[in-house]
Image (cartoon, grey):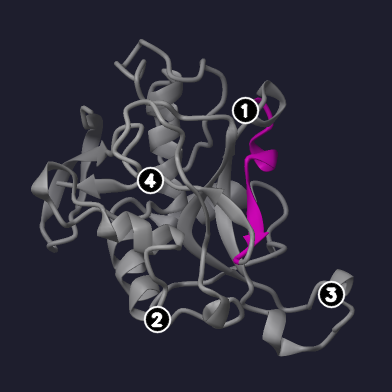
Amino acid sequence: MVHQRIVRSSFRRAPTGGLCHYLEVAPSGWFSGKSNEADPDLAWATKANLYKDVSGIENFQWPPKVIDNWWSDYLKKSMVGIGYKNSVAIVKQGNDTTTAAGAARAYQGGSLNDWYLPTLAELNNFIKWARGVSWKSDSIVVTGGALNSPIYGAETAGLIRAGYWSSNEGTRETVDKAHHVVGNPKYANSFAYLHVNDVDYNINNPAQQLGTAEKVSTARVRPIRAF
């Protein structure tokens, strides 16, 4: 299995606190050790932490207060390089290797231990690379391209048409009536954000690509690292 580097045109802070030039993504089959095997489908948190706020992570409200271009605002806030800090905080809460951030942090590809669950912005850049779409801004949601495109060498990336977890946590001021527990604060922190790399409809409609899912739900996971 070969790790792939996603070239960046600007400097961002690395997990160590310095500056980085690249994001590196784990290869397909990273979880099982078998080449070309699909990414694992994991919950965001353990059962004990499904409704608890993770200390140290900025929560993005759902639904957003800013309706127009909310995804651009959230991508700016999620930032490149913050995923490491987020992932450490998520694991510290008690989320083990059966969860998204726990599995990402446990990965030691290349004998390295600084892998983590990407933020929305980092995940968005990864999907741009995987679809052969040139980088213009971290705040622009990927549109167009073709999955696992050869343009930037992503032929073996193995990204699938599915939702991928980010390390960004969601919160809401009003509890979803679907739970029949309006006003119960227990559910306020039951969401996390994901990026949908799905059918062409999603790729061509940015507002449909970023959203939330309950932490108990499962989504795909792919670790990255910054250096």
Secondary structure, mark 4, is: helix
The x and y percentages for residue 225 are 23, 48
- Dot 3 or dot 4: first in sequence order is 4
Q: Is residue 15 left or right of residue 68?
A: left
Query: Magenta residues?
Result: 204-215
- Point out the tag, 2 or 1, that comes first from the N-terminus: 2
Q: CA distance from mark 3 to mark 2?
A: 25 Å
Q: CA distance from mark 4 to mark 2?
A: 22 Å
Disc 1 target residue = 203
The residue shown at (43%, 43%) is: 123
Mark 3 lies on residue = 179
Q: Tell me, yes or no, whether the highlighted magenta stretch contains residue 208.
A: yes
Q: Is residue 16 above or below residue 174?
A: above
- Does residue 191 lie above or below 126 as drawn? below
The residue under the point 40% across, 81% down is 93
- Pointer 2: residues within 10 angstroms few (<14), some, or many (20+)? some
The quarter of the picture where the N terminus appears is top left
| Residue 137 visible in rendering | no
For image coordinates 78% across by 78% down, the residue present is 174
Disc 2 to disc 1, how far (Cα)? 33 Å
Based on the picture, tell me whether residue 124 belongs to the magenta stretch: no
How far apart marks 3 and 1 lie (CA) works out to: 30 Å
Q: Residues within 10 Å of mark 3 (few under 14, many from 20)?
A: few
- Residue 118 location in percent, x, y? 38, 51
The residue that mark 4 highlights is 122
Looking at the rendered image, the disc whose residue lies closer to the viewer, 3 or 4, is 3
Three-letter amino acid code at the position of disc 4: Glu
What is the C-alpha distance between the residues marked 1 and 4? 17 Å
- Circle 4 residues within 10 Å: few <14, some 14–19, many ≥20: many
Image spot of residue 73 (x, y percent): 54, 53
Q: Secondary structure at mark 1?
A: helix
Q: Which residue is mark 2?
A: 93
